[in-house]
Protein backbone atom coordinates (compact mmCIF):
# COMPACT_ATOMS: atom_id res chain seq x y z
CA UNK A 1 0.00 0.00 0.00
CA UNK A 2 1.44 3.38 -1.01
CA UNK A 3 1.36 5.80 1.92
CA UNK A 4 2.11 9.50 1.57
CA UNK A 5 1.87 10.58 5.17
CA UNK A 6 0.74 9.90 8.72
CA UNK A 7 -0.64 12.01 11.57
CA UNK A 8 0.38 10.40 14.90
CA UNK A 9 -2.70 11.65 16.76
CA UNK A 10 -5.83 13.25 15.30
CA UNK A 11 -8.79 14.39 17.38
CA UNK A 12 -10.96 15.02 14.30
CA UNK A 13 -10.84 12.00 12.01
CA UNK A 14 -12.56 9.29 14.08
CA UNK A 15 -15.81 10.29 15.80
CA UNK A 16 -15.53 10.09 19.56
CA UNK A 17 -11.91 9.03 19.93
CA UNK A 18 -8.33 9.99 19.05
CA UNK A 19 -6.88 8.13 16.09
CA UNK A 20 -3.82 7.69 13.92
CA UNK A 21 -4.56 9.10 10.45
CA UNK A 22 -2.92 7.49 7.42
CA UNK A 23 -3.00 9.06 3.95
CA UNK A 24 -2.60 6.88 0.87
CA UNK A 25 -1.16 8.08 -2.43
CA UNK A 26 -3.13 8.23 -5.67
CA UNK A 27 -6.79 8.64 -6.58
CA UNK A 28 -9.05 7.47 -9.39
CA UNK A 29 -10.98 10.78 -9.48
CA UNK A 30 -9.91 14.29 -10.43
CA UNK A 31 -12.22 16.51 -8.39
CA UNK A 32 -11.20 20.04 -9.43
CA UNK A 33 -11.71 21.48 -5.93
CA UNK A 34 -9.57 18.84 -4.15
CA UNK A 35 -7.25 20.41 -1.57
CA UNK A 36 -4.80 17.47 -1.54
CA UNK A 37 -3.47 17.50 -5.12
CA UNK A 38 -0.12 16.05 -4.06
CA UNK A 39 -1.79 12.92 -2.70
CA UNK A 40 -4.19 12.64 -5.64
CA UNK A 41 -1.45 12.89 -8.25
CA UNK A 42 0.96 10.71 -6.22
CA UNK A 43 3.33 13.67 -5.93
CA UNK A 44 3.59 13.95 -2.16
CA UNK A 45 7.02 14.67 -0.70
CA UNK A 46 8.26 11.14 -0.18
CA UNK A 47 6.54 7.85 0.51
CA UNK A 48 6.29 6.21 3.92
CA UNK A 49 6.90 2.49 3.78
CA UNK A 50 4.06 0.09 4.52
CA UNK A 51 6.20 -1.73 7.10
CA UNK A 52 7.26 1.49 8.84
CA UNK A 53 3.63 2.45 9.36
CA UNK A 54 2.74 -1.01 10.68
CA UNK A 55 5.67 -0.82 13.10
CA UNK A 56 4.40 2.57 14.28
CA UNK A 57 0.98 1.02 14.90
CA UNK A 58 2.58 -1.77 16.93
CA UNK A 59 4.35 0.78 19.10
CA UNK A 60 1.22 2.87 19.65
CA UNK A 61 -1.31 0.15 20.42
CA UNK A 62 -2.90 0.62 23.79
CA UNK A 63 -2.17 4.35 23.65
CA UNK A 64 -4.30 5.16 20.60
CA UNK A 65 -7.15 2.78 19.81
CA UNK A 66 -8.30 3.78 16.32
CA UNK A 67 -6.91 4.23 12.82
CA UNK A 68 -8.36 6.35 10.01
CA UNK A 69 -7.27 5.47 6.47
CA UNK A 70 -7.80 8.33 4.04
CA UNK A 71 -6.21 9.61 0.85
CA UNK A 72 -6.08 10.08 -2.02
CA UNK A 73 -8.43 7.15 -2.42
CA UNK A 74 -7.57 4.11 -0.26
CA UNK A 75 -9.70 1.59 -2.19
CA UNK A 76 -7.42 1.80 -5.25
CA UNK A 77 -4.55 0.40 -3.15
CA UNK A 78 -3.93 -3.31 -3.80
CA UNK A 79 -2.58 -3.79 -0.25
CA UNK A 80 -5.49 -2.14 1.55
CA UNK A 81 -7.27 -5.28 2.74
CA UNK A 82 -4.12 -6.93 4.12
CA UNK A 83 -3.08 -3.68 5.82
CA UNK A 84 -6.43 -3.36 7.56
CA UNK A 85 -6.31 -7.02 8.59
CA UNK A 86 -3.02 -6.35 10.37
CA UNK A 87 -4.35 -3.19 12.05
CA UNK A 88 -7.42 -5.07 13.27
CA UNK A 89 -5.22 -7.93 14.51
CA UNK A 90 -3.41 -5.36 16.67
CA UNK A 91 -6.75 -4.37 18.21
CA UNK A 92 -7.37 -1.08 16.40
CA UNK A 93 -10.77 0.16 15.37
CA UNK A 94 -10.60 1.12 11.68
CA UNK A 95 -12.32 3.95 9.84
CA UNK A 96 -12.15 4.23 6.06
CA UNK A 97 -12.56 7.51 4.16
CA UNK A 98 -13.59 6.80 0.57
CA UNK A 99 -15.11 8.45 -2.48
CA UNK A 100 -17.41 5.44 -2.89
CA UNK A 101 -16.19 4.63 -6.40
CA UNK A 102 -15.28 1.01 -5.65
CA UNK A 103 -18.22 -0.52 -3.78
CA UNK A 104 -16.87 -4.02 -4.37
CA UNK A 105 -13.82 -3.24 -2.22
CA UNK A 106 -16.00 -1.84 0.53
CA UNK A 107 -18.23 -4.92 0.32
CA UNK A 108 -15.23 -7.22 0.75
CA UNK A 109 -13.99 -5.28 3.79
CA UNK A 110 -17.43 -5.35 5.40
CA UNK A 111 -17.96 -9.05 4.66
CA UNK A 112 -14.73 -9.77 6.54
CA UNK A 113 -15.70 -7.51 9.45
CA UNK A 114 -12.71 -5.23 8.92
CA UNK A 115 -14.39 -1.84 9.20
CA UNK A 116 -15.84 -0.12 12.27
CA UNK A 117 -16.72 3.18 10.57
CA UNK A 118 -16.82 4.63 7.06
CA UNK A 119 -17.06 8.15 5.67
CA UNK A 120 -18.35 8.48 2.11
CA UNK A 121 -17.66 11.63 0.13
CA UNK A 122 -20.76 12.75 -1.76
CA UNK A 123 -19.53 15.30 -4.28
CA UNK A 124 -22.82 16.83 -5.45
CA UNK A 125 -26.29 16.04 -6.78
CA UNK A 126 -26.64 13.60 -9.72
CA UNK A 127 -26.75 16.36 -12.36
CA UNK A 128 -23.36 17.78 -11.29
CA UNK A 129 -21.60 14.61 -10.18
CA UNK A 130 -19.44 14.07 -13.24
CA UNK A 131 -18.45 17.73 -13.26
CA UNK A 132 -17.48 17.47 -9.58
CA UNK A 133 -15.35 14.34 -10.13
CA UNK A 134 -13.46 15.41 -13.24
CA UNK A 135 -15.86 13.47 -15.47
CA UNK A 136 -14.95 10.14 -13.87
CA UNK A 137 -17.86 9.05 -11.65
CA UNK A 138 -21.65 9.03 -11.51
CA UNK A 139 -23.85 9.59 -8.48
CA UNK A 140 -25.30 6.07 -8.81
CA UNK A 141 -22.01 4.49 -7.77
CA UNK A 142 -21.88 6.55 -4.57
CA UNK A 143 -25.52 5.66 -3.86
CA UNK A 144 -24.67 1.96 -4.28
CA UNK A 145 -21.88 2.33 -1.72
CA UNK A 146 -24.26 3.96 0.78
CA UNK A 147 -26.77 1.14 0.25
CA UNK A 148 -24.07 -1.44 1.01
CA UNK A 149 -23.19 0.29 4.27
CA UNK A 150 -26.81 0.63 5.29
CA UNK A 151 -27.40 -3.06 4.55
CA UNK A 152 -24.46 -4.07 6.74
CA UNK A 153 -25.63 -1.90 9.64
CA UNK A 154 -22.18 -0.31 9.83
CA UNK A 155 -21.57 3.10 11.39
CA UNK A 156 -21.07 5.64 8.63
CA UNK A 157 -21.36 9.27 7.63
CA UNK A 158 -21.81 11.20 4.43
CA UNK A 159 -19.46 14.11 3.76
CA UNK A 160 -20.00 16.90 1.28
CA UNK A 161 -17.64 19.79 0.62
CA UNK A 162 -19.60 22.99 0.06
CA UNK A 163 -18.03 24.16 -3.21
CA UNK A 164 -19.72 27.23 -4.72
CA UNK A 165 -20.76 26.41 -8.27
CA UNK A 166 -20.82 22.66 -7.60
CA UNK A 167 -22.90 22.36 -4.42
CA UNK A 168 -25.86 24.70 -3.97
CA UNK A 169 -28.58 24.48 -1.32
CA UNK A 170 -30.76 22.86 -3.98
CA UNK A 171 -28.07 20.26 -4.67
CA UNK A 172 -27.80 19.54 -0.96
CA UNK A 173 -31.56 19.07 -0.71
CA UNK A 174 -31.43 16.58 -3.61
CA UNK A 175 -28.56 14.65 -1.99
CA UNK A 176 -30.32 14.23 1.34
CA UNK A 177 -33.62 13.33 -0.32
CA UNK A 178 -31.95 10.58 -2.36
CA UNK A 179 -29.57 9.18 0.27
CA UNK A 180 -31.23 9.92 3.61
CA UNK A 181 -31.97 9.13 6.30
CA UNK A 182 -28.37 8.73 7.46
CA UNK A 183 -26.72 8.50 10.89
CA UNK A 184 -24.42 11.48 10.34
CA UNK A 185 -23.94 14.15 7.69
CA UNK A 186 -20.75 16.22 7.71
CA UNK A 187 -20.75 19.41 5.68
CA UNK A 188 -17.28 20.78 5.06
CA UNK A 189 -16.15 24.28 4.17
CA UNK A 190 -14.38 24.55 0.82
CA UNK A 191 -10.67 25.38 1.07
CA UNK A 192 -9.61 27.65 -1.76
CA UNK A 193 -5.90 28.07 -1.08
CA UNK A 194 -4.70 24.97 -2.93
CA UNK A 195 -6.85 23.08 -5.42
CA UNK A 196 -6.27 20.46 -8.10
CA UNK A 197 -7.70 22.82 -10.72
CA UNK A 198 -6.03 26.21 -10.15
CA UNK A 199 -9.20 27.99 -11.30
CA UNK A 200 -10.94 26.91 -8.08
CA UNK A 201 -8.34 28.70 -5.98
CA UNK A 202 -10.13 31.93 -6.94
CA UNK A 203 -13.56 30.70 -5.78
CA UNK A 204 -14.76 32.42 -2.60
CA UNK A 205 -16.08 29.96 0.05
CA UNK A 206 -19.66 30.24 1.29
CA UNK A 207 -20.29 32.49 4.32
CA UNK A 208 -21.45 31.12 7.67
CA UNK A 209 -25.10 31.96 6.93
CA UNK A 210 -25.15 29.48 4.04
CA UNK A 211 -24.24 26.66 6.42
CA UNK A 212 -27.08 27.55 8.79
CA UNK A 213 -29.51 27.22 5.86
CA UNK A 214 -27.82 23.97 4.85
CA UNK A 215 -28.25 22.56 8.36
CA UNK A 216 -31.97 23.30 8.18
CA UNK A 217 -32.24 21.58 4.79
CA UNK A 218 -30.57 18.41 6.09
CA UNK A 219 -32.86 18.62 9.12
CA UNK A 220 -34.13 15.37 10.54
CA UNK A 221 -32.91 13.33 7.56
CA UNK A 222 -29.66 12.92 9.50
CA UNK A 223 -29.46 11.92 13.15
CA UNK A 224 -26.46 14.24 13.52
CA UNK A 225 -25.28 17.17 11.40
CA UNK A 226 -21.67 18.32 11.69
CA UNK A 227 -20.27 21.44 10.07
CA UNK A 228 -16.51 21.55 9.65
CA UNK A 229 -14.28 24.49 8.86
CA UNK A 230 -16.71 27.13 10.16
CA UNK A 231 -16.62 28.63 13.65
CA UNK A 232 -19.97 30.13 14.73
CA UNK A 233 -20.28 32.87 17.32
CA UNK A 234 -23.92 33.97 17.66
CA UNK A 235 -24.40 32.92 14.06
CA UNK A 236 -21.39 34.83 12.73
CA UNK A 237 -18.23 33.20 11.43
CA UNK A 238 -15.27 33.90 13.65
Image (tube, helix red, strand yellow):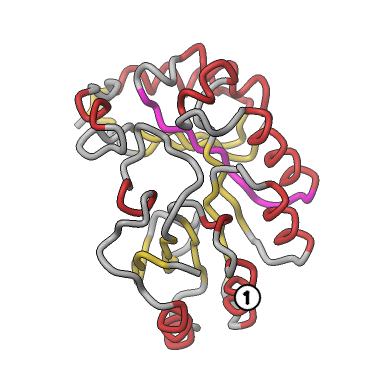
- The residue depicted at 38 percent of the width and 23 percent of the height is 211
Q: 208 or 161, which lies in front?
A: 161
Q: Name the residue under label 1.
A: 88
Q: Quadrant of residue 204?
A: top left
Q: Give the range drawn in magenta.
A: 152-163
Q: Please rate how many residues cluster around mark 1, counting C-alpha atoms within 10 Å: few if below 14, some from 14 to 19, many from 20.
A: some
Q: Main secondary structure of the magenta part?
A: strand
Q: Position of residue 45 (x, y in %)?
A: 25, 64
Tell me if 214 is positioned left or right of 126 in this view: left
Q: Position of residue 13 (x, y in %)?
A: 44, 55
Q: In which quarter of the image is residue 18?
A: bottom left
> Which quadrant holds the C terminus?
top left
**Vertical side of 130 occupied by 18: above or below:** below
- Say what secondary structure mark 1 lies in: helix
**Vertical side of 100 occupied by 72: above or below:** below
- The residue depicted at 29 percent of the width and 59 percent of the height is 44
**Vertical side of 1 occupied by 124: above or below:** above
- The residue depicted at 30 percent of the width and 52 percent of the height is 38
Q: Position of residue 99 (x, y in %)?
A: 54, 43
- The residue depicted at 67 percent of the width and 35 percent of the height is 141
Q: 223 or 234, which lies in front?
A: 223
Magenta span has 26? no
Tell me if 144 is positioned left or right of 79 in this view: right
Q: 176 or 71, which lies in front?
A: 71
Q: How many marks?
A: 1
Q: 130 or 149, which lies in front?
A: 130
Q: Where is residue 140 in the image (x, y as percent from the top left)?
A: 68, 29
Q: Quadrant of residue 33?
A: top left
Amino acid sequence: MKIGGLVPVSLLDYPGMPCISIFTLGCNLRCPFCHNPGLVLDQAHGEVSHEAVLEFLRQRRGKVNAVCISGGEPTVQPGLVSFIREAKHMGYKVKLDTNGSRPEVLQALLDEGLLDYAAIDIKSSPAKYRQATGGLMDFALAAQTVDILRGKNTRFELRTTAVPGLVSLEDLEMIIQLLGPVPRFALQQFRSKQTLDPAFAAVAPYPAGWFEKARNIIGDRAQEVTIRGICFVTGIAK
